[in-house]
């Protein structure tokens, strides 16, 4: 089994809360990890049609079976009627960590469900493998472009599955299946085009109006479609940092895919050589780094805030790490040769903000150095983003 860093946080939360909910995209490793962490708990899978039907026919009786032992309720978003009954059980329960809930869609974004569970459980979002997890489990790869192309789903690494075979099946049977369960999409062909279009917008501010104009679909429909991808754990929105320092700023979030393997497949990238020559290789490199920050942040018991910043006249910082004490700017470059010009936006931002904290450039080269006490260059092949987050 691949050791997952979020496991320690799940255990800690299970000691503090009556129930723990873990969501994330399918095949990200939630079920395997929960069974490993809680081997004595009965396992209930709502993908099983008989189990699902039983929960529909007698929800009180269904949950009563696990009153003494607690249980793992896997893919519980498929049985939404249970949440009201579970609310009462949690209100009466004193034991910590008795129920573990998992879902391949973010069921807490459903207003009715979130109202039922508000304040009654801890909530965690689990992603596919981080760079640190790939390294610590001694999973083999040749270079950073291979990491981007293969993506981070555990099965690809543990079973050595060819990503060219894995992702078309994943997109068809997992993304489409989950989306169809969330909502009845009438223009399915249009939605499929939309998903591919979204992959071309990696690292850009998301604009539903522009996407709708390109596809001939109204902005309201586009907004609902992108929210379905977000709920299913396929895309991630990095919010903007609003402190403008006297500059007009962009207020739309930037779009990233939670996994670069999925994004690469949607872009029609067929192999690593194709990736290295692709016009969006820089965006995919940025996507991987941004999401690895998000993953590392998800392991922390006290996560920090992650943003980007861009002024209306085009000055942009790829990532701003905000903690109680400071703001740390990070620029991400896919080039292999360091260029001192890369500090330009950070220098301008520091002038606007009067912020003198540490600043980082992460690039795809071989050297790693500290130019000054506050300017640090990080080599992607030695990436340890947890250390950067610890400085905040």
Image (cartoon, helix red, strand yellow):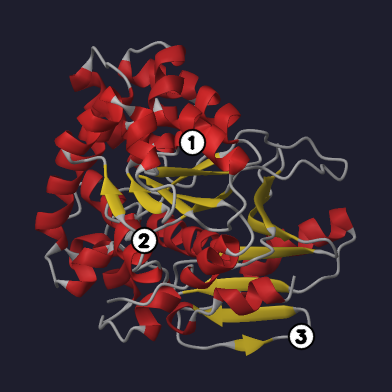
Mark 1 lies on a secondary structure that is: helix
Read off the residue under disc 3: 372
Mark 2 and mark 1: Cα distance apart in space: 17 Å
Where residue 294 sits, quadrant-wise, is bottom right
Mark 3 lies on a secondary structure that is: loop
Read off the residue under disc 2: 41
- Disc with the residue nearer the chain's start (2 vs 1): 2
| Label 3 neighbour load within 10 Å: few <14, some 14-19, many 20+ | few
Q: Which mark is residue 134?
A: none
Q: Is residue 185 above or below residue 281?
A: above
Instruction: Please state which of the two labelled residues, at mark 1 or mark 3, is closer to the viewer.
Output: 1
| Label 1 neighbour load within 10 Å: few <14, some 14-19, many 20+ | some
Q: Which mark is residue 86?
A: 1
Question: Where in the figure is residue 94, as x and y percent of width and height?
Answer: 62, 52
Mark 1 and mark 3: Cα distance apart in space: 55 Å
Mark 2 and mark 3: Cα distance apart in space: 52 Å
> In this orientation, which residue lies closer to the viewer: 300 or 117?
117
Give the side of residue 372 with respect to residue 287, left or right: right
Q: Is residue 216 above or below residue 68?
A: above
Residue 233 seen in render: yes
């Amino acid at each position: 089994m691949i050791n997952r860093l979020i496991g320690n946080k799940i255990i800690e939360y299970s000691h503090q809360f009556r129930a723990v909910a873990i969501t994330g995209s399918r095949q990200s490793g939630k079920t395997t990890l929960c069974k490993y962490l809680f081997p004595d708990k009965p396992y209930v899978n709502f993908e099983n049609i008989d189990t699902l039907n039983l929960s529909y026919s007698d929800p009180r009786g269904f949950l009563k079976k696990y009153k003494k032992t607690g249980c793992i309720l896997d893919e519980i978003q498929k049985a939404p009627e249970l949440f009201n009954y579970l609310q009462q059980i949690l209100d009466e329960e004193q034991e910590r960590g008795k129920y573990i809930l998992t879902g391949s869609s973010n069921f807490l974004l459903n207003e009715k469900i979130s109202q039922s569970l508000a304040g009654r459980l801890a909530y965690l979002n689990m992603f596919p493998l981080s760079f640190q997890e790939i390294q610590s489990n001694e999973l083999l790869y040749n270079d950073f472009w291979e990491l981007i192309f293969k993506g981070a789903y555990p099965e690809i690494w543990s079973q050595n599955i060819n990503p060219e075979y894995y992702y078309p099946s994943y997109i068809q049977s997992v993304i489409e299946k989950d989306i169809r369960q969330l909502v009845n999409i009438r223009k399915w062909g249009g939605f499929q085009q939309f998903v591919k279009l979204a992959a071309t917008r990696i690292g850009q501010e998301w604009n539903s109006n522009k996407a709708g104009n390109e596809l001939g679909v109204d902005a309201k429909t586009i907004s609902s479609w992108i929210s379905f991808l977000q709920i299913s754990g396929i895309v991630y929105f990095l919010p903007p940092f609003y402190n403008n320092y006297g500059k007009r700023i962009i207020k739309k979030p930037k779009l990233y895919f939670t996994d670069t393997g999925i994004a690469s497949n949607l872009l029609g990238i067929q192999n690593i050589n194709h990736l290295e020559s692709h016009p969006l290789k820089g965006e995919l490199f940025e996507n991987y780094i941004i999401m690895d920050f998000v993953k590392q942040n998800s392991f922390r018991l006290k996560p920090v805030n992650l943003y980007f910043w861009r002024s209306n006249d085009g000055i942009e910082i790829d990532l701003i790490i905000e903690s109680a004490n400071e703001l740390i700017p990070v620029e991400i470059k896919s080039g292999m040769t360091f260029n001192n010009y890369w500090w330009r936006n950070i220098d301008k931002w520091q002038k606007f903000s009067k912020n003198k904290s540490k600043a980082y450039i992460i690039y795809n080269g071989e050297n790693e150095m500290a130019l000054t006490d506050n300017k640090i260059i990080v080599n992607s092949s030695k990436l340890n983003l947890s250390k950067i987050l610890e400085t905040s």
